[in-house]
Amino acid sequence: MKLNEIGEFGFINRFKSHFDHLVQERVMGIGDDCSILPADEVSDWLVTTDMLMEGVHFLRDAISPLELGAKSLAVNLSDIAAMGGTPIGSFLSIAIPANVDVEYLDEVMKGYHSLSETYATPLLGGDTTRSLQHLAINVCVVGKCPRGKAKLRSSAKVGDLVCVSGNLGDSAAGLQVILGQHPLNHEMRYLVDRHHQPIPQIGVGLLLGATPEVHAMMDISDGIASDLLHILKASGCSATVDLDRIPRSSELRTVALQQGWDTYALAVGGGEDYELLLTVDPSHFMAINTMLCNNGISPLTNIGTIREGTPSIEWYLNGELANFSKGGFNHFMQ
Ligand code: ADP
Ligand code: MG
């Protein structure tokens, strides 16, 4: 059997349960953005790891080494943000082929260091090895959150509003621009930057993490068609989403119009926006947005509602039920 027959999650599900009995009380293992381990009386540790593989996650010709270094840390910080946590430190493992120069690696580390400074997250260790062909970067980030307060994928409640931070689809459109090798206009440059320079939503995550009326939360790495399903499966409910309410940047709309691209497909099926996807008690939605605005942060957008039912998403476009078949990006089943 080939991996593309069962996909990334099919593979994980083949071995996950074999480890369950080894997982100690108060430890949460595989299945959320981070694993959770008890730290002390008042806090929990959060641990996450993510790998960027040349040819799969980045093209060495397209992304600058500065951006690559920063992105490899950013995507991990995003998982800490998804739990409502504070990053504490990182570990960096890197496999380097012979055709990568030290000057290139210095730039990678400059980008990594710059983001480490921004989020006060020191590099605490790692591993360095040769690679026969491709550059591979694996990062692990450790974070902390108040004990028992990490935001989980499994906490959505029927009646919750489905909300997102920021705009969706920019990163996927940026990738389309890169792959299409278009000469870049201003809007295309913006989209490519959104793909190469994701911003981990640590500040928003912390504020939302401290808000009890925020129930389930995760970051958007694969596109909401796939990511929202993770929340629905973990919480045992279904959802309706209004496609026309999904926030899309003016740059995305402009380029999509020029190129004949479907902004809904990019916003829903494309990945790597690294914004937050969350479910919120409807009676507190306004108050949460006021709180975010008071902290200088853009408001959340309500894109749908959590419903009773088996895990599935009903998509609506201008009030009409819409057929949306393209799932989120799955590394082994494209
Ligand atoms: P994310 O996109 O938030 O980084 P993933 O979709 O990559 O999460 O992974 C889903 C869950 O599966 C996470 O809890 C992750 O830790 C776990 N996971 C992924 N790959 C493996 C693996 N090879 N071994 C153990 N756990 C894994
Ligand atoms: Mg995640």
Image: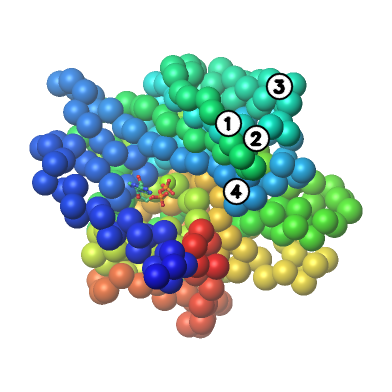
Left or right of 152, for residue 88: right
Q: Is residue 235 above or below residue 60?
A: below
Dot 2 surroundings within 10 Å: few (below 14), some, or many (20 or more)? some
- The residue where tag 2 is placed is 97
Q: Quadrant of residue 117?
A: top right
Contact, mark 3 vs mark 1 (Cβ under 8 Å): no
- Looking at the picture, how far across and down is residue 233, in whole percent? 29, 63
Which sits earlier in the primary sequence, circle 1 or circle 2?
2
Q: Residue at x 48, y 82 (%)?
A: 321
Which coloring applies here?
A: rainbow
Dot 3 surroundings within 10 Å: few (below 14), some, or many (20 or more)? few
- The residue where tag 1 is placed is 130
Contact, mark 1 vs mark 2 (Cβ under 8 Å): yes
- The residue where tag 4 is placed is 57
Dot 1 surroundings within 10 Å: few (below 14), some, or many (20 or more)? few
Q: Quadrant of the C terminus?
A: bottom right
Left or right of 35, for residue 197: right
Which sits earlier in the primary sequence, circle 3 or circle 4?
4
Marks 3 and 4 sit apart, C-alpha to C-alpha, by 22 Å
Marks 1 and 2 sit apart, C-alpha to C-alpha, by 6 Å
Q: Amino acid at mark 1?
A: Arg
Q: Quadrant of residue 110?
A: top right
Marks 2 and 4 sit apart, C-alpha to C-alpha, by 16 Å
- The residue where tag 3 is placed is 102
Which sits earlier in the primary sequence, circle 1 or circle 4?
4
Marks 3 and 2 sit apart, C-alpha to C-alpha, by 11 Å
As helix, strand or loop, the secondary structure at mark 1 comes to strand
